[in-house]
């Protein structure tokens, strides 16, 4: 009787195990198939978007009106963004596609810049047409290459995700071990595009202006600068790490003093504080934001940052973060940005971030505005009730600075900042001021 019961239990277990194994097998196969379908859909959509980019660039070569070029550039931006999204979904992260991605980033951005030139009554130069022709050539080549790969996918010679159960970053190929690397190589002579846009080559190669003539300091020299800046003892400073091959190489240290820990980043060139952040609990809020702004202003002056003007702030977790911009001869330089964090329990400065200041701060040659304040006001909408007017250098997406009149005013219950080019009278930017108990920010 015992034997029968044992065999019955054993049989049930074997059957159950078999059913479970079969279920898991089909579940895994369905997962792999679903994954491959996702990859295939992303690939074919990528192919369609690149085909559209190729066509739109060809049309762009024929466009002479601002309206048509603006329409083409808008469509190119949409198609290029969608193509980048599809490329990111493919399991090819082991292959470096930097130049392919750069092409997709620049193609819509560059044509948008050309459309803005036409809107400003400028003409497209021969060099710009040559760049457009070059972009069109690379688009055609990429389109042809993806078309060839599409044929391999249709025929089953190229499959994505075949080894997905092993690694989602592997791609199984029957004929070519690395077709996407071949595509990347076709961008070997891809031109450097310098233009007034956020993906321009010059932005990638920008160096911190404040560090141009500075020498590189040693780790010990960095510690000495930290000791002086924070007024702490040398034995309280501990080395953590350092960054290399970045725009702003730096040392990282930790200060452990009086039961508080502060993380500090300091540039290797010149030894300037990039940021610091103190890790401490903020208790009951006793200070107002206005108190915090004054504390932050005093702190910056004490640390050698002169002529800094507060602009916006944000309050969270009992800490007020105040933005400051450098002011040269009454001109606000918004690129030279420093953020200061002030604890609202006792006014202690618990953090600072000076990346924007280090990247952009320099003595500028600021010309006298071609337009008077009154002339610039004539370019403002009559629906804006103006409260204050400043003059400022504002950064464009390309990091180029533009001298503007900054008009702050209200309309329909909202606060606005309108920037009018002080040379041309063009409307450079419009910001909405969002004011709440937790801060003043712009969108």
Image (cartoon, grey):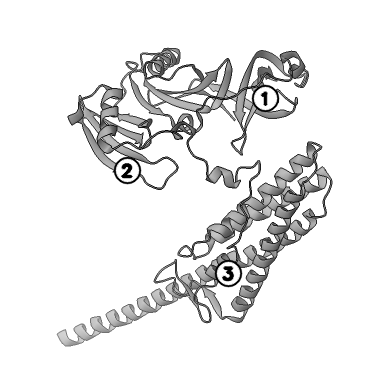
Foreground: disc 3 or disc 1: 1
Front-most of residues 247 and 16: 247
Q: Which residue is mark 1?
A: 419
Image coordinates for residue 30, horizontal then vertical, percent:
48, 73
In percent of the image, x 22 and y 86: which residue is there?
7
- Pointers 3 and 1 in contact (C-beta within 8 Å): no
Foreground: disc 2 or disc 3: 2
Foreground: disc 1 or disc 2: 2
What crowding class fits label 2: few (fewer than 14 Cα within 10 Å), some (14-19), or many (20 or more)? some
In percent of the image, x 20 and y 24: which residue is there?
258
Q: Which residue is mark 3?
A: 40
Identify the image quadrant of the C terminus.
top right
Horizontal relation, residue 227 to residue 173: left or right: left
Horizontal relation, residue 274 to residue 162: left or right: left
Q: Which residue is mark 2?
A: 242
Cα gap from disc 2 to disc 3, whole angstroms: 42 Å
Quadrant position of residue 240: top left
In percent of the image, x 39 and y 74: which residue is there?
24
Image coordinates for residue 227, horizontal then vertical, percent:
25, 26
Q: In the rendered view, tell whether residue 188 sits above or below residue 267.
A: below
Front-most of residues 37 and 313: 313
Q: In the rendered view, tell whether residue 68 sits above or below residue 167.
A: above
Horizontal relation, residue 133 to residue 106: left or right: right
Q: Earlier in the sequence, mark 3 or mark 1?
A: 3
Q: Earlier in the sequence, mark 2 or mark 3?
A: 3
């Amino acid at each position: 009787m015992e034997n029968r019961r044992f065999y019955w239990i054993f049989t049930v277990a074997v059957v159950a195990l078999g059913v479970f194994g079969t279920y898991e097998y089909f579940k895994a196969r369905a997962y792999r198939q679903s994954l491959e379908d996702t990859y295939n859909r992303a690939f074919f959509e990528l192919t369609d978007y690149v085909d559209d980019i190729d066509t739109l660039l060809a049309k762009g070569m024929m466009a002479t009106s601002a309206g048509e070029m603006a329409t083409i550039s808008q469509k190119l931006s949409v198609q290029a963004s969608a193509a980048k999204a599809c490329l990111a979904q493919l399991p090819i992260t082991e292959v470096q596609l930097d130049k392919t991605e750069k092409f997709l980033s620049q193609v819509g951005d560059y044509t948008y810049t050309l459309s803005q030139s036409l809107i400003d009554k400028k003409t497209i130069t021969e060099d710009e047409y040559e760049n457009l022709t070059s972009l069109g050539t690379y688009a055609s080549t990429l389109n042809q290459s993806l078309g060839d790969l599409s044929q391999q996918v249709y025929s089953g010679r190229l499959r994505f995700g075949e080894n997905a159960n092993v690694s989602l970053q592997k791609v199984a190929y029957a004929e070519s071990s690395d077709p996407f690397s071949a595509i990347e190589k076709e961008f070997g002579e891809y031109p450097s595009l310098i233009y007034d846009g956020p993906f321009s080559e010059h932005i990638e190669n920008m160096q911190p202006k404040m560090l141009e003539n500075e020498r590189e300091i040693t780790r010990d020299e960095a510690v000495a600068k930290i000791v002086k800046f924070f007024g702490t003892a040398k034995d309280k400073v501990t080395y953590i790490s350092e960054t290399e091959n970045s725009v702003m190489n730096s040392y990282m240290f930790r200060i452990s003093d009086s039961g508080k820990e502060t993380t500090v980043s300091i540039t290797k060139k010149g030894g300037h504080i990039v940021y610091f952040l103190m890790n401490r609990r903020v208790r009951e809020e006793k200070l107002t934001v206005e108190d915090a702004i004054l504390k932050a202003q005093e702190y910056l002056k004490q640390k050698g940052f002169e002529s800094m003007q507060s602009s916006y702030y944000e309050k969270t977790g009992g800490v007020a973060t105040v933005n400051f911009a450098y002011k040269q001869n009454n001109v606000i330089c918004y690129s030279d940005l420093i953020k200061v964090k002030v604890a609202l329990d006792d006014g202690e400065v618990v953090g600072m971030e000076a990346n924007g200041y280090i990247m952009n701060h320099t003595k500028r040659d600021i010309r006298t505005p071609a337009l008077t304040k009154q002339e610039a006001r004539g370019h403002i909408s009559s629906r804006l009730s103006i409260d204050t007017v400043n003059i400022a250098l504002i950064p464009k997406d390309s990091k180029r600075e533009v001298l503007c009149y900054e008009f702050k005013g209200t309309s329909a219950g909202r606060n606005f900042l309108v920037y009018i080019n002080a040379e041309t009278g063009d409307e450079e930017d419009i910001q909405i001021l969002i004011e709440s108990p937790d801060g003043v920010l712009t969108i």
